[in-house]
Amino acid sequence: MRTALLQSSGRPGSVAENLKVLDEASARAAAAGAGLLVTSELFLTGYAIGDDIPRLAEPADGDAADAIAETATRHGLAIAYGYPERDGERVFNSAQLISADGTRLANYRKTHLYGCFERDHFTPGERTVVQAELDGLTVGLMICYDVEFPENVRAHALAGTDLLLVPTAQLHPFQFVAESVVPVRAFENQMYIAYVNRVGREGEFEFVGLSTLAAPDGVARTRAGRTEELVVADADPVFLAASREDNPYLTDRRPGLYGSLV
């Protein structure tokens, strides 16, 4: 499945402008043959917007979700996007996957919140593995810091995830996560990982870009630079099956030895 990574911080504080950015990127992604477009963490609203987070947060089936479903349908591709999700009095740092026919397939709430900023503004999610079927692949969702916990990604591997989507807001000086950790996670868990970052300065934060689609051989199939960019690469189920045959980490595990980890 051809997958487009939208490395962009959008227009922080403006949902309407970010929907326009997403629409334009969807047109370019579809023209490049992509069946899936993935955005960065909290793309819908912006990340460093402080007390505007609860004001701009929407339910998973809110107006923005409807607008993105219309965009997905019009351009004929699935869209995974990051946004602040309101559920009653609680706000979650979430990512939602919408199919090319406008169906909401999966919604994930970030389980590992990073730093005081996120812990002050969000409630942590409690469900580690969220998946959906898309064009013959089992697609999983995760957000940023979550992928830095090996247990999280291994849980997805054991649940059969083929392509893990990770909207992220990776900060300087931790670019080694994009450069090294994510490809290793893809290799050790035998899956594709689409890691899609914000870029540039936003408030007190500096995002490093370097969005990548890492393959199960540990090699980046595409990698963005340090500016706003749309990059495209394929998640190939045939290559994935062959790689899993050659690298049987999951079948060679000895779970009885690992009880102390949990």
Image (spheres, rainbow, N blue to C red):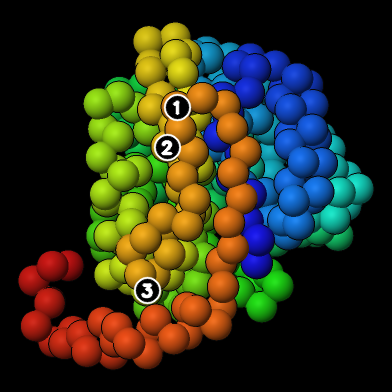
Q: Residue at x 70, y 72 (%)?
A: 135
| Label 3 secondary element | loop
Pointer 2 and pointer 3: residues touching (CB < 8 Å)? no
Residue for badge 1: 226
Q: How many marks?
A: 3
Three-letter residue code for mark 1: Arg
Circle on res. 210 = 2
Circle on res. 68 = none
| Label 2 secondary element | loop
Disc nearer the start of the sequence (3/1)? 3
Instruction: Choose between 217 and 43: the one closer to the eye.
Output: 217
Q: Is residue 20 left or right of residue 42?
A: right
Residue for badge 3: 190
Q: Nearer the viewer, mark 3 or mark 1?
A: 1
- Image coordinates of residue 183 in percent, x first then y, are 33, 57
Picture layout, residue 239 above or below residue 111: below
Quadrant containing the N terminus in the rendered view: bottom right
Disc nearer the start of the sequence (2/3)? 3
Pointer 1 and pointer 2: residues touching (CB < 8 Å)? yes
Q: Residue at x 30, y 34 (%)?
A: 175
- Image coordinates of residue 189 in percent, x first then y, are 33, 71
Picture layout, residue 172 above or below residue 155: above
Distance CA(mark 2)–CA(mark 3): 21 Å
Res 176 → quadrant: top left
Res 19 → quadrant: top right
Q: How crowded is the residue under tag 2: few (<14 C-alpha within 10 Å), some, or many (20+)?
A: many
For the question of whether residue 190 can be seen, the reply is yes
Q: Nearer the viewer, mark 2 or mark 3?
A: 2
Distance CA(mark 3)–CA(mark 1): 27 Å
